[in-house]
Image (tube, helix red, strand yellow):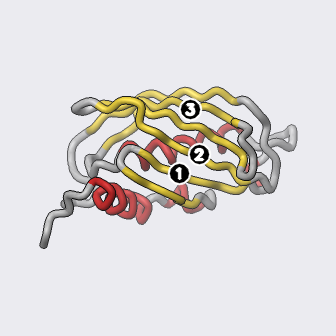
Amino acid sequence: MTEVTDPHQVAEAATAAMWARDRASQAFGMTLEAVGPGTAVVSMAVRADMVNGHDIGHGGMTFTLADSAFAFASNTYDRVTVGAIAEIRFRAPTRVGDVLVAAATERERGERRGIYDVVVTRRGSDEVVANFVGYCTEIGGSVTGG
């Protein structure tokens, strides 16, 4: 078997392996739209069962979407990486039917740690719904098992 060394192919293989086991993101109806070394874009439609008592999107769902984009982006090097710290700033409410798009971008990546920015927007709009920053740590091993 030939070892994959192209960074984009490594990112795609690691993400595919992670996605296949990520029951939570799938259950929430998330879609993995794009991936590359240190980046990922994940979307999700806000459903009726995702709103809070004010009839707006539950903040925890927005956090979960951003966290999933962060997780996929931070694992694109095929090294098992987990979140260590995350913070979010909510900037706009969401409603049933909105499609949220979380774009994660690597800000910094060291030997075992990284920092990722995630911007959540509403599809069809440049309006930022939330800003998320995630700090990660590699714990050893390969995402693809290679």
Q: In the rendered image, which residue does mark 2 sit on?
A: 102
Q: Earlier in the sequence, mark 1 or mark 2?
A: 1
In this view of the protein, which residue sits in the foreground, 32 or 61? 32
* Secondary structure beneath label 1: strand
Q: In the rendered image, which residue does mark 1 sit on?
A: 41
Residues under numbered marks 1 and 2 in contact, where contact means CB atoms less than 8 Å apart: yes
Is residue 94 shown left or right of residue 87?
right
Q: In the rendered image, which residue does mark 3 sit on?
A: 132
The residue that appears at 77% across and 52% down in the rendered structure is 98
Q: Which mark is residue 78?
A: none
In this view of the protein, which residue sits in the foreground, 142 or 105? 105
Question: Which amino acid, mark 3?
Answer: Phe
Q: Earlier in the sequence, mark 3 or mark 2?
A: 2
Tell me if residue 131 comes above or below residue 98 in the rendering: above
- What is the crowding at mark 3: few (fewer than 14 residues within 10 Å), some, or many (at least 20)? many
The residue that appears at 78% across and 43% down in the rendered structure is 94
